[in-house]
Amino acid sequence: MGADDLDGVMGLHVPRIDEAVGEPAMGEIWRLRWDRAAVLAIIGQVRPHDVDAYALVELGRPEVGTLRIDHAETGLGVLDVAARHVVAVSRAVLDARLATTSLGSAIEAVADSPRQPWDYGPEELIEAVEELEEFRMIAWAPSVDRQTEPSASGEDYFDELVDAGLPVNRALAISSRSATPTDEETEIIERTTGQRPAAPAVAPALRIAIDRPRRKHAILRRAQAAGVSEGEVRLELARDAEPALLAARGTRGAPPDYDLVVDRLLEDDA
Amino acid sequence: MADGSGAWTELRESESVGPLTTQLVYRAVRVVVRRRRFPPPNDHGTWDSDAITEVAHEFLLDLSSGGTLSAGRLSRLVAQATDEASFERLVHKTVLNYLRQQARGSARGAVLEQLRHALGRIDGVDRTVSHAWSLEHCAGELEFAGDPSDLIAAAYGVDDVRLVRWNSDTRRSPLAESDSLRRVLLDVLAAADAPVTESVMVEVAIARFPLAIEPAPMEFKDEENAHPDLVPAEAMEMAQDIWDQLSSEERVLLAVPDLTVRAVADLLGVGKSTVDRRRHSISEVIRSYGPALVTTEVIGILRQAASVLEALGTHDPGSASETSEEA
C-alpha cells in the first residue's frame, strides 16, 4: 500500500502541547469541550459566567476578516482567527489552555468595531464558525435570579406538590425553583403530575464554582464513569451542594464558600 | 478502532509520526479525494497510489517549512482530539481543508487571468505602474487600503448579474456573463475610489462569485476501479459518512422516503414544516457529495439505516456532528 512509501516522514517529531487549566484570559487559545465534542477557540472578553470565543481554522492564506497566528507563537501550526464572528460560550465548556497569544489587543479592536454580516468566506472558515456555534447552545442549568415566593403558576405547582405528599417546606422550595428535587421526590412528582420537574435555576456563585475550568476533568471523569453527560453531573453537583451550602453558611448569613463545597463533593473521585 | 490502539495514541506516546499515523493520513487522502472529486496533482492524470502518496507526503511533511508547520498541525489535532475516533475525524477534516486550499491556489490564478482580461477591455479603467486597477480620475492616488468587505458589498449591490451556464468538464466557467462582470468591476472600482491591487480584486471576485473557485469536475478513475461505481465497502463508507452528518430526527426520515409529508408528520407527531425542513436538510447533505458518488446502492443502505446501521452500533449519540438544538 502507498502508505509504506511515506518513509521520509516517519519519525517526524510532533511535540506534545502543554495543557493548563486556570482562569481564562483574552488572547488565550483554549480547547472547548462538552462530552465528546471539542473545538479550539481563542478567547475574547471574559465575564463571570461566560466568555467570548472566536473560531480557529487553518486557511492556507489570510482571508478578509481573519487574524493570523504564526506557528512560532504557539507551536500549533499556522492558524487563522474568524475575527468577525464572536460566539459567547459558557465557562463550563472551557477544558484546557493550550497557548497564549499576543492577539489580545487585536481581538479587542475587532470586538469594538462594527459587526459585519457573516455571509462569505472559504467553506472551512464557515464550517469552523458553525462548529463553534454549537457550543453557544450549551447551558446545563437555567440562569438565576428568581424569587423565593412562588409565582402565580408556581402556586398551582406548589399545591400539586403538597397534594403529591411532599412536605410543605420542600414543596415551597421546589416550586420556587430554589431547590432541586431528590431522586425520590422526582419520582413522586413525575408519578403524580405526569411530568418530570424542570431543572431548577442554580445560584450564580454556585454555577461559577462548578464551571471553573480546573474542575472540568474531574467532572468529565465522573460523567464517563457513570455513562452520563457532563450536564447531568453538573446538575447533580448543584443538587448535592444544597444541604452542604446550607450547613456551610457563615454566621449572620454570611455567604458560604462555594468553591470549598464543590471541591469536597468532587474529592471522592480523586 | 478501539481507543488506545491507533494513530492518536501513537502520536501522544511517541511524539513522532509512526506507521499508524501514516496509514491514517494515506487513507484519509484516498477517501477524501474520491468523495469530493478533487482533481489529481498536475503531474498525475489520475488518483493512483503515487498521486495519493504525493499528497499525503506533502500533508505530513510540508516541504516549505521542513516539516515544522506539518508537525505543528499534527500537534494541534492531537491536542484537540478526545479519543481515537475524534482524531480520525479531525484528520479527515484537515485533509479536506488542505485539499480545498490547494485547489483554491490554482483557481486564484485562473480568476486573476479572467479579471485582467475583463478589466483590460473596460473604457475608463487604467492599470497603474504597480499593476493596480483604477478608474481614470483616481489613477494617481494611493492604493485602496480600506476594508475589502466594503468592495465585496459593492459587488453584491449590482443588480441583474447574470452567470453563465457552463458545460465543459475541462475548463473553468467564466466568473459571470461579460456585461455583468463589467458592471460589477466598475462598481467595485467606484466604491474604492482609489487604485485596487490585483490581490484585492481577486479576493473581491472570489467572494462575489464563489462558484468560480470550485475544482473543475472530473470523472473519477483509478487503477483499482475501472468503473466509477462504488464497490460495496465504499458504498457502506459513503453511507456512514452521510449518516454521521444527520441528526437523529433526520435519520428517522430515511426509513420512510415514499410517504407524503402529511403522512410522515402524522406518523412522527410533528408539523409538516418540520418534516419539510428535515427532508431539505437531508437533500442538502446528499447533494454536497454529488450524484455520481451517492449511488442507488448508497441510498439503499441509508434507507435501511434505521434498522441495519442502528443494529451495527454505528450510531454515535455523542458525535460532534449532531446538533443540540432540537428540543
Image (tube, coloured by chain):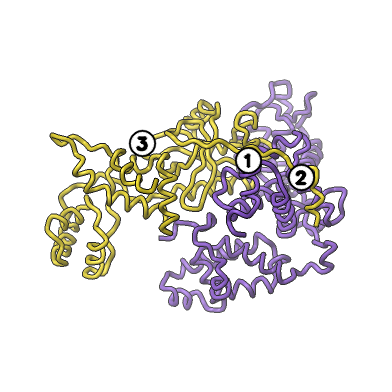
Chain colours: A yellow, B purple
Label 1 sits on a secondary structure element that is: helix
In which image quadrant can residue B269 be found? bottom left
- Disc 2 is attached to a residue of which chain? B
Q: In terms of depth relative to the viewer, which is nearer, B272 or A100?
A: A100
- Disc 3 is attached to a residue of which chain? A
User: Which quadrant of the figure contains the C terminus of chain B?
Assistant: bottom left
Q: CA distance from mark 1 to mark 2?
A: 30 Å
Q: Which residue is mark 3?
A: A48
* Whether residue A63 can be seen here: no
Q: Which mark is residue B107?
A: 2
Against B86, residue B184 (above or below) is: above
Q: CA distance from mark 3 to mark 2?
A: 46 Å
Nearest to viewer (mark 3 / mark 1): 1
User: What's the amino acid at mark 3?
Assistant: Pro
Q: Residue at x 15, y 36 (%)?
A: A253
Q: Position of residue B90 (x, y in %)?
A: 62, 50
Q: Are labels 3 and 1 assigned to the same chain?
A: no
Q: Residues within 10 Å of mark 2 (few under 14, many from 20)?
A: some
Q: Is residue A138 left or right of residue A16?
A: left
User: What's the amino acid at mark 1?
Assistant: Ser
